Amino acid sequence: MHADTNEQSFGVDSEYIGVAVEVFRLLADQTRVRILLALRDGELSVNHIADVVQRPGPAISQHLAKLRWARMVTVRNDGNRAFYSLTDEHAIRVVREAILQAEHAVDAHPPHHGAS
């Protein structure tokens, strides 16, 4: 994983805003978000991911192909089995922040703020 060197190196005129919007579009799918959450603790096979997110293997493979295209996950082949892992910490950080924001949208006192 790579450390960020300057998190404030972008502004309203960043050349990456369009790509960032594409990242949000890609993550606007529950199965893809669940896949990323499943991979946060390490490498998993396609079948294991399918079991964890409770979706059919072929559907998981299609979602993984899109996440690979976006360079959010990487694949390691071992014989006829494919194992996936997160490329870096950024995708899971985006998902985490989105879930924390969702808690604010749903609860007056979000669980991540602790007991009030």
Image (cartoon, rainbow, N blue to C red):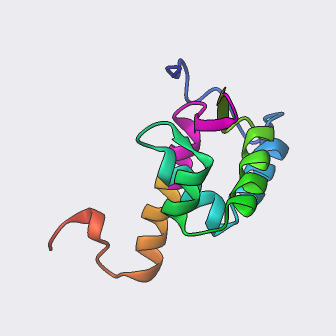
Does residue 35 appear to the left or right of 111 in the view shown? right
* Vertical arrangement, residue 2 with respect to residue 44, above or below: above
* Vertical arrangement, residue 116 with respect to residue 26, above or below: below
Picture quadrant of residue 8? top right
68 part of magenta stretch? no
Q: Where does residue 37 sit, x and y in percent of width and height?
A: 49, 53
Between residue 65 and residue 82, name the one nearer to us. Answer: 82
Picture quadrant of residue 53? bottom right
Q: Disc count in the image?
A: 0
* Vertical arrangement, residue 105 with respect to residue 50, above or below: below
Q: Where does residue 97 sit, x and y in percent of width and height?
A: 48, 54
Q: Where does residue 57 sit, x and y in percent of width and height?
A: 68, 60
Which quarter shows the C terminus?
Answer: bottom left
Q: Which residue range is magenta in the image? A: 79-95
Between residue 108 and residue 46, name the one nearer to us. Answer: 46
Q: Where does residue 88 sit, x and y in percent of width and height?
A: 56, 30
Residue farthest left in this picture: 116
Q: State the residue at coordinates (60%, 36%).
A: 83
Q: State the residue at coordinates (53%, 17%).
A: 5
Does residue 49 appear to the left or right of 66 in the view shown? left
89 part of magenta stretch? yes
* Vertical arrangement, residue 87 with respect to residue 93, above or below: above
Q: State the residue at coordinates (45%, 37%).
A: 42
Q: State the residue at coordinates (63%, 65%).
A: 31
Between residue 19 and residue 64, name the one nearer to us. Answer: 64
